[in-house]
Image (cartoon, rainbow, N blue to C red):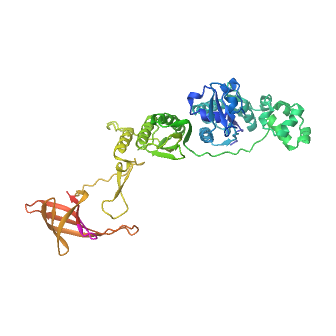
């Protein structure tokens, strides 16, 4: 089996600080915007949009210079949003190839993808590039893609592609001619190297490639040979792939504090849209969503919503978050928010031809959320017995749907039902020979006919609480013949009797 020839696709997104902020602010994408970096009053423009550049703004301008332009939106740089956006892009690119190398620079996102042998999955390189570009644009990022058999030629060409030509493929063996018109600054020269080439009059890669190799090495050493190989598209590269983990997180720093829940949900809707888009690319669904609100005063407010089944229904998530935040509102104005999610398998329900229609899980989730808002979270869920011998102890857990179908065992054996008394009722008991003889329950006197027990129950040795109980199962009858089967509990520490349960 022959190894396929090397083939690389380079993805380049310029003005990345601005794009990372604008991808979640669609209303500002068609307006002149600049991103400021640094502390006032020495902050400077580090990134800007195309319309801002048309107006005459440039990198390095101070806030005073920017204020001289009208109708320009000024935003502070957010390294958190850039990191989240970068993670989302690497996840998107990783769906096309497991071999991805991150070559990002300050102010630009750059990565290279090894797509050798991927034609059987995605078609020719141009089809792969168009599909990848579609997924990148769905994330709100504008980028360019260059494809070449030489790693560095693809990077150099991607950096110079205009927005009007987002895809460019270099035919095999034509790398030197295609990248020859590119400016020498593409190679990220050192200050000394740029000064030397400036004195020589070398301005493009083609002019550098035409220099004689031996004379160049004699004047600049091995670094000169390396630069010449880069300019000719002949430099070999040892690929160093990264392995990004699936990290479903979206973050937005607000331009002004938010206090109204409706305004917060509008921002949450934008973040949820991106999370669902990312998780759908991996054929998964959102199993839980955690919202973290950064409040004024340096505090944080976090809430987690987990429906019965993983789902990608955005209106359902909005409704669940709305009900949860309405029941547990933040205590101060919101400055920033983050959404993190856990992925889960998409739920599939297959019904028989004559099976009745089942209710939608979303309706159950919304109903349970509304009930929690009324009675409290600790009073809604399913009962789970605790690991103790104390009578009547349990805890509440959220409803969950089991992943696999449990085996159902049918039994024809008839058993008596027990009805627990909550709370237990204190009763008067007459004891004879250390066994209950008679007792009074709800105004009636019962004579004990049969006794079973006692079963002794003591406290947990690892806890400081003390309780010692005797449990008796009794069959008693009144004077008019009414039968009663019950369970009495004798608290030996307090020397009291309680009616704990009735048997049917």
Tell me what residue is drawn at x 89 percent, y 33 percent.
Answer: 199
Coordinates of residue 474 in the picture (x, y in percent): 19, 65
Q: Is residue 211 left or right of residue 142?
A: right
Tell me what residue is drawn at x 86 percent, y 35 percent.
Answer: 197
Q: Nearer the viewer, residue 240 or 328?
A: 328
Coordinates of residue 69 in the picture (x, y in percent): 67, 25
Q: Is residue 16 visible?
A: no
Residue segment shown in magenta: 489-496
Q: Is residue 461 left or right of residue 28?
A: left
Q: Nearer the viewer, residue 344 or 394?
A: 394
Where on the picture, by quarter, is residue 250? top right
Where on the picture, by quarter, is residue 79? top right
- Quarter of the picture containing the N terminus is top right
Q: Is residue 244 above or below residue 187?
A: below
Tell me what residue is drawn at x 13 percent, y 64 percent.
Answer: 446
Q: Is residue 218 left or right of residue 400?
A: right
Residue 55 among those drawn in magenta: no
Coordinates of residue 264 in the picture (x, y in percent): 48, 36
- Quarter of the picture containing the C terminus is bottom left
Furthest-bottom residue in view?
433
């Amino acid at each position: 089996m022959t190894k396929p020839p090397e083939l690389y696709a380079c993805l380049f997104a310029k003005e990345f600080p601005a794009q990372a902020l604008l991808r979640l602010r669609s209303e500002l994408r068609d307006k002149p915007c600049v991103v400021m970096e640094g502390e006032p009053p020495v902050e400077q423009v580090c990134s800007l949009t195309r319309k801002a550049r048309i107006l005459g703004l440039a990198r390095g301008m101070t806030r005073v210079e920017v204020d001289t332009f009208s109708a320009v939106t000024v935003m502070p740089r957010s390294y958190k949003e850039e990191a989240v956006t970068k993670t989302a892009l690497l996840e998107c690119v990783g769906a096309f190839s497991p071999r991805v190398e991150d070559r990002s620079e300050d102010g630009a996102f750059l990565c290279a993808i090894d797509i050798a042998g991927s034609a059987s999955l995605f078609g020719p390189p141009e089809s792969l590039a168009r599909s990848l570009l579609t997924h990148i644009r769905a994330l709100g990022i504008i980028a360019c893609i260059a494809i070449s058999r030489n790693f560095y030629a693809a990077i150099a060409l991607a950096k110079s592609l205009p927005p009007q030509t987002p895809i460019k493929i270099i035919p095999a063996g034509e790398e030197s001619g295609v990248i020859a018109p590119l400016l020498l600054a593409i190679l990220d020269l050192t200050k000394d190297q740029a000064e030397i080439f400036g004195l020589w009059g070398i301005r493009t890669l083609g002019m550098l490639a035409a220099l004689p190799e031996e004379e160049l090495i004699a004047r600049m050493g091995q670094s000169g040979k390396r630069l010449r190989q880069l300019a000719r598209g002949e430099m070999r590269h040892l690929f160093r792939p990264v392995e990004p983990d699936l990290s479903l997180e979206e973050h937005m720093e607000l331009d002004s504090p938010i206090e109204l829940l409706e305004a917060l949900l509008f921002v949450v809707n934008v973040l949820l849209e991106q999370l669902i888009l990312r998780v759908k690319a991996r054929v998964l669904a959102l199993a839980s969503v955690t919202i973290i609100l950064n409040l004024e005063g340096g505090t944080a407010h976090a809430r987690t919503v987990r429906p019965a089944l993983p789902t990608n229904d955005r209106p359902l998530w909005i409704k669940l978050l709305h009900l949860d935040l309405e029941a547990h509102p933040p205590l101060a104005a919101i400055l920033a928010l983050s959404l993190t999610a856990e992925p889960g398998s998409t739920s599939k329900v297959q019904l028989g031809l004559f099976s009745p229609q089942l209710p939608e899980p979303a309706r159950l989730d919304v109903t349970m959320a509304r009930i929690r808002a009324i009675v409290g979270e600790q009073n809604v869920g399913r009962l789970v017995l605790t690991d103790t011998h104390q009578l009547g102890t349990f805890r509440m857990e959220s409803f969950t749907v089991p992943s696999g179908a449990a085996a159902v065992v049918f039994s024809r054996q008839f058993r008596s039902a027990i009805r627990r008394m909550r709370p237990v009722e204190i009763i008067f008991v007459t004891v004879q020979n250390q066994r209950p003889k008679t007792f009074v329950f709800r105004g009636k006197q019962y004579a004990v006919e049969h006794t079973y027990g006692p079963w002794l129950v003591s406290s947990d040795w690892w806890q400081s609480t003390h309780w010692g109980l005797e449990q008796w199962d009794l069959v008693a009858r009144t004077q008019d013949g009414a039968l009663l089967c019950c369970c009495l509990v004798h608290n030996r520490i307090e020397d009291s009797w309680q009616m704990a349960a009735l048997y049917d």
